[in-house]
Amino acid sequence: MKQTLLNLKSMASRAINDSVMRSTDISAIKDVEITPSQRRDVFRVSLPAYDRRTVTLQHKSSDAEFSGQIVDISIKGFCVELPAIHVDFMPLGERFRYLDMELPDQRMTLSGDAVLVNLRPSGKPDALSAGFAITNRDPYAERALMRAALYYQRSAISWRV
């Protein structure tokens, strides 16, 4: 949990340097409650239901494309809710290309490579939540994901207040 708090403070510091946040927003980050279930080494934030965005995925060995709704994001990856038919039979470790990921406060969409690292049941019938780790992250993608995570975190804080 200490590592998570350090990562959150580090992200906030970088955001200040990038002029992403106003100084008044930093006080809100200090008060964010991080539960013990946040066990990852990188902060992850859920997208609100009203702002779920889509991403297109393409399996590396196929030209077939399918889309899903982004459930959560972090600097290292994302989780997508997909129809089970697209990923149910795939083993973990399969490589994909993600295309046209639209994130808030960004002029361009993100595209790159990702590896399937987790499959879990979704709240929707006949759907799965598929976790992907982004491979070969460039500085632009990492920065865009960090800004998006902070954007959604600020939105969640403002809804609580």
Image (cartoon, helix red, strand yellow):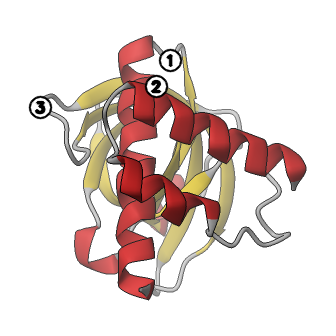
Specify whether 158 is left or right of 131.
Answer: left
- Binning the other alpha carbons within 10 Å of mark 1 as few (below 14), some (14 to 19) or many (20 upward) gives some
Q: Place residue 85 in its image quadrant.
A: bottom left
Tell me residue 104's x, y (percent): 23, 48
Secondary structure category for the residue under label 2 = helix
| Foreground disc of the pair 1, 2 | 2
Tell me residue 84's x, y (percent): 49, 67
Residue, disc 3:
107
Q: Place residue 69 in its image quadrant.
A: bottom left
Q: Are marks 1 and 2 in contact (CB under 8 Å)?
A: yes
- CA gap between label 2 and label 3 equals 15 Å
Vertical arrangement, residue 160 with respect to residue 25, above or below: below
Type of the residue with mark 3: Arg
Of 14 and 23, the residue lying toward us: 23
Tell me residue 8's x, y (percent): 64, 46
Residue, disc 1:
137
